[in-house]
Amino acid sequence: MIRLSLVALALASGISLSGTSSASADPGICSPIGGVAIPNFFAEGEGNPIIISATLIGSVQNAAGKITGQRETPTGLEMDMEHYFGRADGGAFQTKDLGILTAVPGKPGRFMIEITYDIQEGTGRGTMKGANGSFNSYGLVDLRDGNNLEGLVRYSGEVCQ
């Protein structure tokens, strides 16, 4: 149940970006990012991943992703993730990420979530070609009901090209 919920939450994470351009060896021109995601969750059955797609408010319009590893910690959970972000102008890039979920004391099934997104070299396409850098998100999530996951996540940082 928690794994299903966490997969859904992690994959729903999204961002908003503005485009710039340069080579990946040089950070180039950097632009601030920030936004919120509106996720949809699609269970594929026991033992299969949860498919997540998200509409984003901001300069990135969609996101998808998956959890590649998960570990319990003394304070909650830790997840290895990948995300794929796309823009209406055709720009896109991929990230490999670390998600930290910290249980909220006295509130079973509720977590503070923090994700660090690292843009993978060579994954930028279209208007995001050459994208590099990292950014973060944080928020609160309610994972008590695997069929009704709720949360609010805010993204911020910058993307360089």
Image (tube, rainbow, N blue to C red):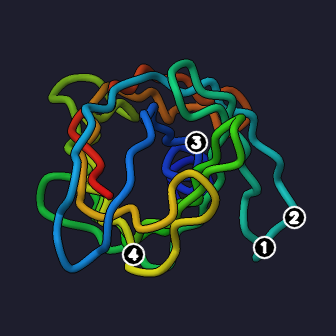
Rendered position, 158 above or below 99: above
For marks 1 and 4, the one nearer the N-term is 1
Number of numbered discs: 4
Q: Which residue is mark 2?
A: 45
Q: Nearer the viewer, mark 1 or mark 3?
A: 3
Q: Nearer the viewer, mark 4 or mark 2?
A: 4
For marks 3 and 4, the one nearer the N-term is 3
Where disc 4 sits, the SS reads loop
| 124 and 97: which is toward the camera | 124
Q: CA distance from mark 1 to mark 3?
A: 17 Å
Q: CA distance from mark 4 to mark 2?
A: 30 Å
Residue at (49, 68) in percent of width and height: 82
Q: How far across and down, in percent of the image, does residue 89 sit?
A: 69, 38
Q: How far across and down, in percent of the image, does residue 128 sit?
A: 51, 55
For marks 4 and 2, the one nearer the N-term is 2
For marks 1 and 3, the one nearer the N-term is 3
Q: Nearer the viewer, mark 1 or mark 4?
A: 4
Q: Which residue is mark 3?
A: 12
The reply to whether discs 4 and 2 touch (Cβ–Cβ < 8 Å) is: no
Q: CA distance from mark 2 to mark 1?
A: 6 Å
Dot 1 amino acid type: Asn
Q: How far across and down, in percent of the image, does residue 150 sit?
A: 55, 23
Q: Which residue is mark 1?
A: 48
Q: Quadrant of residue 47?
A: bottom right
The reply to whether discs 2 and 1 touch (Cβ–Cβ < 8 Å) is: yes
Where disc 3 sits, the SS reads helix
